[in-house]
Image (cartoon, helix red, strand yellow):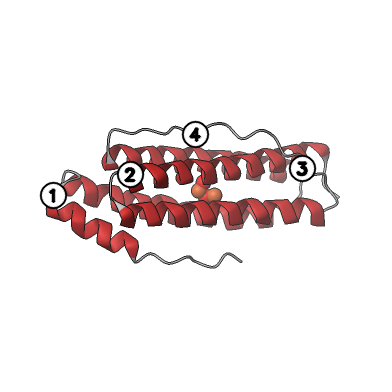
Amino acid sequence: MITKNIEDELNKQLNAELYSAYLYLSMSAFLSKKNLNGFSHWMQLQFEEEQAHAKKLFQYILDRGGNIQLEQISKPKTEWLGIIDIFEHVLRHEQAVTSMINDLVDAAMNEKDHATVALMQWYVSEQVEEEASVSDILDQLKLIEGKGSGLFMLDREAKQRILNPIN
Ligand code: OFO
């Protein structure tokens, strides 16, 4: 059994993961309109990964005998200045998610809820990976000033991304 406080925090994180999915789907649409089909594909995989993150929390809450509280998902932004602006947004967003996850770990530690701490460690590691891969892409985009043949090459590279299985 989880406490009401942890149940609320987990549900809040579940909503945040679904919002992340929504945000990346919106970015995918924008990038497709700009003919950056590789990056659009990359964002669709982000969308799928975030849904998997949400489902993992969903299952955990149920497994611990908690209640699912699905809330309204905020409307994501639909326009950006360009590819660099998008990836800066992704990085800021992931940093904000990391901070939410850290708060959730703190809350679980305070309550000596070891199972939730263990679950959230998976998210802590996932955030390290996400922030690192987004920072790498952002650095490369800045190097080529987000344009020209460099952008064409990076877009082709983004198209190669495959979905990592979530466990
Ligand atoms: Fe769920 O990792 Fe990004 O937000």
Which residue is denoted by mark 1 in the rendering? 148
Q: Residue 102: x and y, percent?
A: 58, 43
The circle on residue 33 is 2
Q: Residue at x 46, y 45 (%)?
A: 24
Disc 4 packing (10 Å; few <14; some 14–19; many ≥20)? some
Q: Residue at x 41, y 47 (%)?
A: 28
Which mark sits nearer the N-terminus, 1 or 3?
3
Q: Amino acid at mark 3?
A: Glu
Disc 3 packing (10 Å; few <14; some 14–19; many ≥20)? some
Q: Residue furthest left?
A: 148
Q: Amino acid at mark 1?
A: Gly
**Mark 2 vs mark 4, CA separation in Å:** 17 Å
Q: Residue at x 53, y 46 (%)?
A: 21
Q: Residue at x 76, y 47 (%)?
A: 112
Which mark sits nearer the N-terminus, 2 or 4?
2
**Mark 4 vs mark 1, CA separation in Å:** 28 Å
Please say if the residues under marks 3 and 4 sit with CB atoms less than 8 Å apart.
no
